Image (spheres, helix red, strand yellow):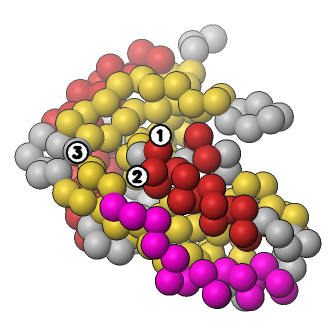
Amino acid sequence: MAQTYRTFIAVEISPGIADQAARLIGRLSRTGAKVKWVDPGNLHLTLNFLGDVEALLIPDICKAVSAAVADIDGFDLELAGVGAFPNVAKPRTIWLGAQKGEEEMVVLHDAIEAALADLGFRGAARRFKPHLTLGRVRQIDPELSELIAKEEDFAAGRLPVDEVAIMSSELHREGPEYTMLGHAEL
């Protein structure tokens, strides 16, 4: 059986953004809601999730991603605004949003998605919404919804986006472990 990697393409965040997100998680976690919070050291902005990929395809993926982003200029991304999918009233995923630079992130995602389609990867059915996942809600608590709404103007800072990472994740009971498989500069 061929070795596979659970693979995704992401923008890594700076330690300053991770610190701001950790402070926010600390405030949001004071409710009675059962939430699986993302460890601040594992925070990233996922552009494309590929699922289980055979190890032999990883070099082709790295080449395709590099070619896709080669003509895209680096940009600044402002991470601000807290929200939830599907909505704040019934949160399942709590996130920190992207403001300035959001459209550039969509362009980046779309370019990578088109390049990966040539390798047989299907794109997402809905429009890409750049976000930093903070936690996944296991049991809803009205107090959590109220706190999310109060943090809608939270600003974590700016992040220069000048490369993307091709990553793998191994899922463990204590949380995922990420490994860098490659990177591509904008």
Residue 167 position (above or below residue 136): above
State how far apart marks 3 and 2 are (Cα): 14 Å
Q: Quadrant of residue 4?
A: top right
Sequence-wise, which precedes: disc 1 or disc 3? Answer: 1
Question: Is residue 176 on the magenta stretch?
Answer: no
For label 1, the residue is 8
Residue 22 in view, yes or no: yes
Look at the numbered disc 1 and give the secondary structure of its residue: strand
Q: Amino acid at mark 3?
A: Asp
Residue 74 position (above or below residue 9): below
Are the two marked residues, 1 and 3, in contact with CB atoms closer than 8 angstroms? no
Look at the numbered disc 2 and give the secondary structure of its residue: strand
Which one is nearer the viewer's eye here, 141 or 46? 141
What x and y, as percent, mark residue 57? 39, 22
What x and y, as percent, mark residue 127? 40, 71
Residue 106 in view, yes or no: no
- For the point 80% across and 35% down, which residue is it? 174
Left or right position of 35 against 112: right
Are the two marked residues, 1 and 2, in contact with CB atoms closer than 8 angstroms? yes
Q: Amino acid at mark 2?
A: Leu
Q: Quadrant of the N terminus?
A: top right
State how far apart marks 1 and 3 are (Cα): 17 Å
Q: Quadrant of residue 24?
A: bottom right
- For the point 53% across and 68% down, which residue is it? 96
For label 3, the residue is 162
What x and y, as percent, mark residue 77? 30, 62
